[in-house]
Image (cartoon, rainbow, N blue to C red):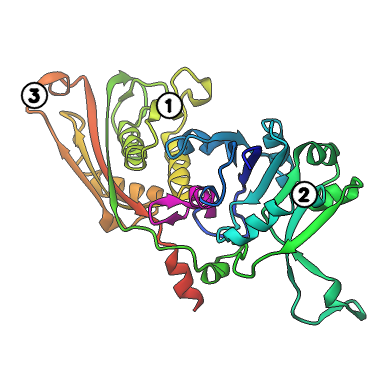
């Protein structure tokens, strides 16, 4: 069935998952969940086009993993889907959520086999328990728990979503618009990953690999008189600072590059260009916080950091403890995992001529081990 587009919805913030990382970035061996789900579906059918809806800030990073079409998401699932629909030119589309990880081939085959029987084909599972509603009971034989993926006729779904009314799934929108729905049997193993407790129900997910990733950052700034100096977020008591677009914290800038390097996410200039006035004189700790949040969101933990400050002046021996504490707090890692060294160039080069300071940082990261959440819930 080549005239079919896959739309994977993965732009959410995982608020109900309630972890430091977003569930779409938890690693299955080495693959983020959004890629694992997409590849799994690709083994079932040859799609004409694949569209992944993602957080706009993560799209450039996602392009490192796959050559799909990426579309920015919206605040609501429906907005995200409408953004994707603008790129769909096939007669049919299969829409699923990144949280529906363990979809089985049998379900997808049933959706496709029955594609002509209604405007949308929907998997469901039966309700096994008695349902008490208000002051009475509902007939559980008449109840259906709706799952994804759902197979729609593209034109009909576009028309159904051409409204400001919000729907929680595609079949509800099509029904409300006068369309028809055909139901196929879903699968109880295709649990939707909503809360951390759900991880224990998803048997198709394998543990993340235990590799360590190393990034190296290097930065240099010349001195500028009559400006405050900051290193590692600590104010240094000297009458000069650093010439820079931001506050010039050369150590934090090196740390940012090391973090980005360890996860393969470019460099500080790509994220915070000096041509952007939003970053004029900005506190570098704010930039580091943004990068740390990104590192956590896309599924990494910081293991340790080693920083070398290369300076003929100022003398930093009295500041090293404060600098370590500052970086420990900013990176949210133990003090013992932060090391800071200070050295000179024996009066050689621009550092030796006391014209500026250089900093090198080395960072190690690893994939967040989401299996520890399962152990907590046993």
Label 1 to label 2: alpha-carbon separation: 38 Å
Q: Secondary structure at mark 2?
A: helix
- Residue stretch in magenta: 22-40
Q: Tell me whether circle 1 and circle 3 mark residues in contact (CB < 8 Å).
A: no
Determine which residue is flagged by label 3.
347
* In the image, farthest residue toward the left: 346
Using the image, determine if residue 365 lies above or below residue 19.
above
Look at the numbered disc 3 and give the secondary structure of its residue.
loop
- Identify the residue at horizontal 59%, vertical 36% (top origin): 49
Report if residue 17 is visible in the image. Answer: no
Residue located beneath label 2 in the image: 170
Height in image: 37 above or below 281? below
Q: Earlier in the sequence, mark 1 or mark 3?
A: 1
**Residue under the point 23% across and 23% down:** 356
Please provide percent x and percent y for residue 120: 78, 50
Which residue does the image show at 64% across and 67% down from the upper left? 187
Q: Position of residue 362 (x, y in %)?
A: 25, 42
């Amino acid at each position: 069935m080549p005239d079919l587009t896959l739309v994977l919805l993965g732009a959410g913030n995982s608020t109900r998952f309630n972890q430091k990382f977003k569930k779409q970035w938890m690693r299955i061996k080495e693959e983020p969940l959004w890629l694992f789900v997409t590849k799994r579906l690709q083994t079932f059918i040859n799609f004409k086009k694949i569209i992944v809806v993602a957080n706009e800030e993560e799209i450039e990073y996602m392009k490192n993993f796959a050559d799909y079409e990426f579309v920015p998401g919206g605040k609501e699932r429906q907005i995200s889907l409408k953004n994707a629909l603008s790129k769909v030119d096939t007669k049919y589309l299969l829409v699923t959520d990144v949280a529906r990880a363990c979809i089985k081939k049998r379900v997808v085959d049933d959706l496709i086999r029955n594609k002509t029987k209604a405007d949308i084909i929907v998997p469901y599972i039966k309700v096994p328990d008695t349902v008490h509603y208000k002051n009475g009971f509902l007939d559980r034989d008449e109840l259906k728990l709706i799952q994804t993926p759902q197979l729609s006729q593209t034109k009909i779904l576009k028309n159904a979503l051409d409204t400001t009314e919000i729907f929680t799934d595609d079949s509800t929108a099509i029904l409300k618009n006068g369309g028809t729905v055909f139901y196929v049997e879903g699968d109880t193993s295709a649990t939707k990953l909503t809360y951390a407790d759900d991880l224990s129900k998803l048997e198709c997910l394998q543990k993340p690999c235990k590799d360590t990733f190393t990034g190296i950052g290097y930065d240099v700034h010349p001195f500028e008189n009559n400006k405050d100096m900051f290193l590692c977020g600590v104010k240094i008591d000297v009458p000069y600072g650093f010439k820079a677009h931001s506050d010039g914290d050369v150590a934090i800038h090196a740390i940012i590059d090391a973090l980005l390097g360890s996860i393969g996410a470019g460099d500080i200039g790509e994220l915070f260009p000096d041509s952007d006035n939003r970053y004029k004189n900005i506190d570098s700790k704010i930039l580091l916080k943004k990068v740390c949040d990104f590192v956590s969101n896309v599924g990494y933990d910081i293991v340790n950091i080693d920083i070398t400050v290369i300076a003929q002046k100022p003398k930093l021996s009295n500041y090293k403890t404060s600098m370590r504490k500052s970086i420990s707090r900013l990176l949210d890692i133990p003090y013992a995992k932060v090391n800071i060294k200070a050295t000179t160039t024996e009066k050689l080069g621009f550092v030796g001529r006391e014209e500026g300071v250089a900093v090198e940082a080395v960072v190690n990261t690893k994939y967040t081990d989401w299996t520890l959440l399962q152990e907590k819930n046993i």
